Image (tube, helix red, strand yellow):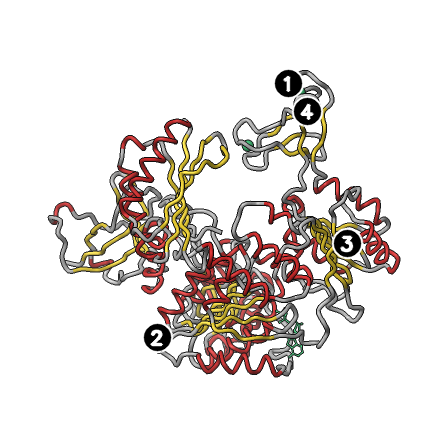
Amino acid sequence: MSIAKVEPLLTTRNVSGPFDYRLPDAMREVEVGSVLVVPFGRRRVVGVVVGLADRSDLPADRLAEPLEALEAGVPPELVALGRWVGEEYCSTPARGLGLVLPPGVGTGAEARRVRPLVELEVEATDRGLDAIAGGERLGLRQRAVLRALAGGPRLARALANSAGSDRSTLRRLEARGLVRTREVERRRRHHAPGVGAVREGIEPTGDQRSALETVVAALPAPGATDSTSSFLLHGVTGSGKTEVYLEAAREALARGRGAIVLVPEIALTPQTMDRFRRRFGDSVALLHSRMPAGARYDEWRRLRSGEARICVGPRSAVFAPVSEPGLIVVDEEHDSSYKQESDPRYDAREVATRRAAESGAVLLCGTATPRPESWEELERLELPSRVDGRALPPVEVVDMRGGVPGPLHPATREAFNEVAGQGGKAILLINRRGWSTHLTCRSCGHAWQCPNCDVSLVLHRDGGLRCHHCGHAETRPQACPECSSVTIARVGSGTQRVESELTELLAPLEIFRLDSDSAATRGHAEVLSRFEAAESGVLVGTQMVAKGHDFPDVTLSVILDADGALRLPDFRSEERTFSLITQLAGRSGRGAAGGRVLVQALATGAPSIRYAARHDSAGFLAEELERRRALRYPPFSHLIEIGLAGADESRVETSAETVRALVEDRISADDELLGPAPLFRLRGKYRRRLLIKSERRHETVAAIREAVATAVRDRALRELAISVDVDPQ
Ligand code: ADP
Ligand code: ZN
Ligand code: ZN
């Protein structure tokens, strides 16, 4: 008897698989990684085969058979990786496996499933070709079809267009032995096929060459899984990092290995994608969530079958079915989009490290602003200068202390006026934190807060008040509900107000808005390409204006409230601030006209701002690492956060103590347990947080997993929602 051990893809934490199913003869080909539809209780659910056995501990009459085996299965090494993620991020095996499934499976068995697109292809037989020359009697349509086929096989659909044939014409021709038909799978393409030269004729610089030599020397031979190397490619913006990825990928392919290239959000980095497609053509598969399901499925299968050997995509591409990867690239490794913010809260950089180690691949992380973790842990390869030899633009810190009227310092205004005068281009980054506008009563100090979340409501341009956490909206008040005073003050300048002030100030320069609101209506890519095509203008937006775009004619970059993040209680604030300023500076002065960078801040002496102004990553990281070591923060420990939420505050409070005790009993004495600390109320839920600092992540996560499992079974904690975040960002 063949038994499949199946992990059903249910979202609940209460079910712990795998479960045994008997495989009928018709399912002989089922293997580890096969995706099955199985009966589960009274439901049909999708499950993944995680093991096979000859016998089961269950009596034969209790064993059910799977209902269906899906055509596409997951490679066994990805089954292992998915289960590892489920464990290591304190999620469930099912949720971990959900990450490695072929696209379009859907976890509900009822979900509409994506299938290969199959079409009919028609080919003339030798007799058919002879028939055109004479010999056989042919109808007008039949002759037209055979003529069209003289050059080779065609799709039935194409023949219908060109030769006016329908199915019955083809059937009659086939019956007479003049044509053959067969079903072929057609690839749904989302992107136009890559165009342009296969090689761009770029001669690597000396720095690029030596980085590449080190990476190539570490690439594994076909089949080898015994060693792995990890590198940090630290290169200033414009230093040609992508060129190193491209050549390293080519070398991996030459050794019979595949490659995975992770990039931050696709919409903001279409150029990297493009360059891979131009260099490698159909050997590259792209996987991202904006693609239609059919195209994504086809790309996944091209990788699975080995037809495509390189996968480029965002964090989820770390689970791409590339067989025998020899190289895993993480481009812009500092980018926060590598962390998934919903369960399983995995970090694609960690998963990439794991996958590289398991497959013997080289891990290559590139950035201009490395994370302290990577700086400390990876072997460094340096690209210290821009390929065009241009200097990085000078960064000027503009001190906003001492009552500057309005959001712009006179010096900043002056700089914008200059760009406007030249009809040039500028980028303005508004650090959103700290810029929203709130209302407060001048008489009694009443602040308008969200009824569901303990945060202030934000005043919008349309006059309404909104909660940025739960979406609660109300109209702007006429009077204070506490004291009836009508003197209501606005606090903070607000992104939109800054924008309207700028629009006036910079006229006639056009403003191009890039933020999450503009994304909903027009899409980032469109705003970016309009800005690129324009003669002049200012690209205005939040953090996303600092990401990888390359506009050579931008001569001024400005960041407002650069130290906004430093006022938040987050140990990564300095790192984020340094990265934001440096990345923004990288957007300026990429062309012959040079450029300058203005950084408006209050805390002008903060290390992140001082070092960023000197383009000194090494200096910043050395100081930051010392601070982290002293405070026992990553990379000198791992943080694990346990979030607890419930509708009844006093119950959440006592439950939090219970969970704390469960955790404390299980973790090691060397681990540090902090909390429960209150978090602001969110969407009507009271929240508490426990924080664990540990030097042994694996063991501590295991202990916490057990504590959570115990808590989930405890009826007294039934109403408590528990979430775990390993290495929170
Ligand atoms: P980074 O990713 O480090 O910011 P890119 O790889 O995007 O830099 O390179 C910036 C630009 O320089 C690109 O247009 C790229 O084609 C070009 N480039 C890269 N390497 C070279 C080289 N060796 N010679 C000439 N141009 C190069
Ligand atoms: Zn009042
Ligand atoms: Zn709210």
Q: Is the CB atom of the residue marked by disc 1 within 8 angstroms of ligand 2's nearest atom?
A: yes
Task: Tell which circle, 1 or 4, labels the residue nearer the N-terminal end.
Answer: 4
In the image, which disc is placed on residue 538? 3
Q: Is the CB atom of the residue marked by disc 4 within 8 angstroms of ligand 2's nearest atom?
A: yes
- Mark 3 vs mark 1, CA separation in Å: 41 Å
Q: Quadrant of ligand 3?
A: top right
Residue labelled with disc 2: 225
**Residue 157 visible in this rendered orientation of the protein:** no
Residue labelled with disc 1: 481
- Mark 2 vs mark 3, CA separation in Å: 50 Å
Residue at (33%, 50%) from the top-left corner?
A: 94
Comparing marks 3 and 1, which lies closer to the viewer? 1
- Mark 1 vs mark 2, CA separation in Å: 68 Å
- Mark 3 vs mark 4, CA separation in Å: 36 Å
CB-based contact (under 8 Å), mark 3 and mark 1: no
Residue at (59%, 37%) from the top-left corner?
A: 468
- 466 or 566, which is in the foreground? 566
